[in-house]
Amino acid sequence: MGRLVGFALGGMIATLLVSFLPPSASTIAVAIVVGVGAAGGSVAREPREVVWLAVGALVGTAAGGAIQVPGPGGPEVSEVITGSATVALVVAAAGFVALVVTRARPPPPPRRR
């Protein structure tokens, strides 16, 4: 259970930090989101961990958007919901691709002593 919580917190913290980037850094934000999914998927042992990573990303993005909503010129609630769902899907897709690729690799040969 602790490992799943770690995946959720990792996704949440990473995407919460992305929400503080200026709009001009959107390419960097996309790279970070895809990188979080790929990194999480490559160390995941099972698909459930990737799902928890995506749930954490959803919560982190929603929290970042909720922080920005009250201010003038901030995003609307519908934009926060749509953006959070999109980020969660991107993280999940990158995570599942990395998980499949990592599992498809042959195991390293045993070491000779």
Image: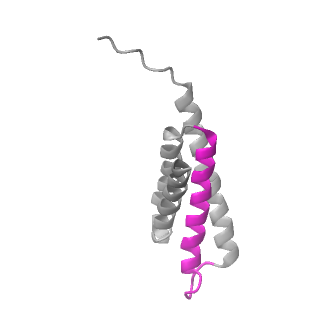
Horizontal side of residue 80 vs 105, given as left or right: right
Using the image as rendered, state which of residue 90 and residue 105 is in the foreground.
105
Q: Is residue 26 visible?
A: no
In the picture, residue 5 is in which quadrant? bottom right
Residue that extends furthest to the front in the rendered view of this protein: 1
What is the x, y in percent for residue 37? Answer: 54, 48
Q: Nearer the viewer, residue 67 or 45?
A: 45
Q: Is residue 24 above or below residue 74?
A: above
* Residue at far left of view: 113
Q: Residue at x 46, y 66 (%)?
A: 17
- Give how far across and how far down residue 59 sits, in percent: 60, 65
Q: Nearer the viewer, residue 102 or 33?
A: 102
Q: Quarter-wise, where is residue 98 in the image?
A: top right
Q: Is residue 78 left or right of residue 64?
A: right
Q: Residue at x 50, y 39 (%)?
A: 42
Residue 65, given in percent of the width and then of the height, sits at 58, 74
From this view, report whether residue 97 is shown above or below residue 37: above
Q: Which residues are magenta?
A: 46-75
Residue drawn at the location 49% of the way across and 40% of the way down: 43
